[in-house]
Image: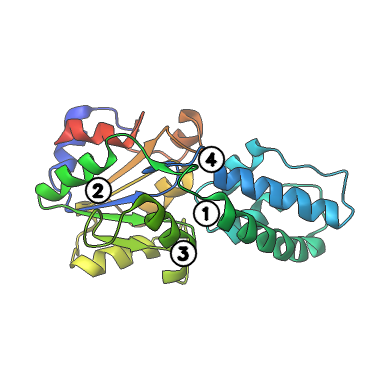
Amino acid sequence: MSTDINSIKEKFNHIKLCVFDMAGTTVNEDNLVYKTVRDAINQALSDEDKTAQEVGLDICLAFGAGKEKRQAITDILNELNIAKDDVESLTDTAFTIFKTRLSKAYTAETLAPFEGMLELFDRLKATGRKVVLNTGYDAITANNILAILGWSVGNEIDALVTADDVTNGRPAPDMIMLAMGKFGVKDTPQVLKAGDSGIDIEEGKNANCGLCIGVLTGAQTRAQLETSSPDIVLDKLTDLAQLL
């Protein structure tokens, strides 16, 4: 991992498109989504009389962070001592529970932008860079979050790309490539990807982004993020301002 700030600044000078994850990166929700994943899986396990199994938040963060949420549930269940034949039906049950719970969990009381986020967006756009949010959420959930925050495409952000918009979710580069197409950015070294999970960084690497940045405000620790070899790990996304 490069920690040479001058090298990072040089790469940043070429960036035209900034692709930022939502929950845990730009939006503070105190890992509510993964707590909801945990609770949904545990309810599904209980309903299926698999009471010997119980999932903790740590395993949800380790194996589910940053992913499309149905895939996250599958991957978490695959880490448990559960017969493979049972994983698909448990995923169906848990994902249905998850969607119902999350639709009620996200409110103006449980969501807020991280401090200084809109100011960062404004400064990036003032330099001619595009600001795009991408997410492992479905479009309904992602747009509900924007509505709660009072953000909209064409105002606070330039575009939103969700898991519903592509065939392959993270760590595939599809969402980043779609964002590039929206703004005619053809050279991947001109793209920055930042997120709070290793999957975010892998997504950026798979797209050959010029900068892949981890942040410590969400799902994973510095040690977990560094296993995906980011260019740099920041305490918070707004620390990007020091590169402007």
Q: In this view, does 117 lie above or below 44?
A: above
Q: What residue type is labelled 3?
A: Ala
Asked if the residue at tag 3 contacts the one at tag 1, i.e. Cβ–Cβ closer than 8 Å, the answer is no
Q: What residue type is labelled 2?
A: Gly
Asked if the residue at tag 3 contacts the one at tag 2, i.e. Cβ–Cβ closer than 8 Å, the answer is no
Question: Which disc is residue 31 wearing?
Answer: 4
Question: Which disc is residue 210 wearing?
Answer: 2
User: Residue beneath label 1, please?
Assistant: 67
Q: Pinpoint residue 56: horizontal percent, then vertical percent.
A: 70, 38
Q: Whole-Å distance between the Cαs marked 1 and 3?
A: 9 Å
State the image quarter where residue 241 is shown: top left
Q: Pinpoint residue 137: horizontal percent, then vertical percent.
A: 49, 59
State the image quarter where residue 52 is shown: top right
The residue at 84%/56% (across/down) is 47
Of the two numbered discs 1 and 2 in the rendering, the one whose residue sits closer to the viewer: 1
Of the two numbered discs 2 and 3 in the rendering, the one whose residue sits closer to the viewer: 3
Query: Which of pointers 1 and 3 lies earlier in the amino acid sequence?
Result: 1
Q: What residue type is labelled 1?
A: Lys
Query: Which of pointers 4 and 1 lies earlier in the amino acid sequence?
Result: 4
Of the two numbered discs 3 and 4 in the rendering, the one whose residue sits closer to the viewer: 4
Q: Label 2, secondary structure: give it.
A: loop
Local crowd at mark 2 within 10 Å, few (<14), some, or many (≥20)?
many
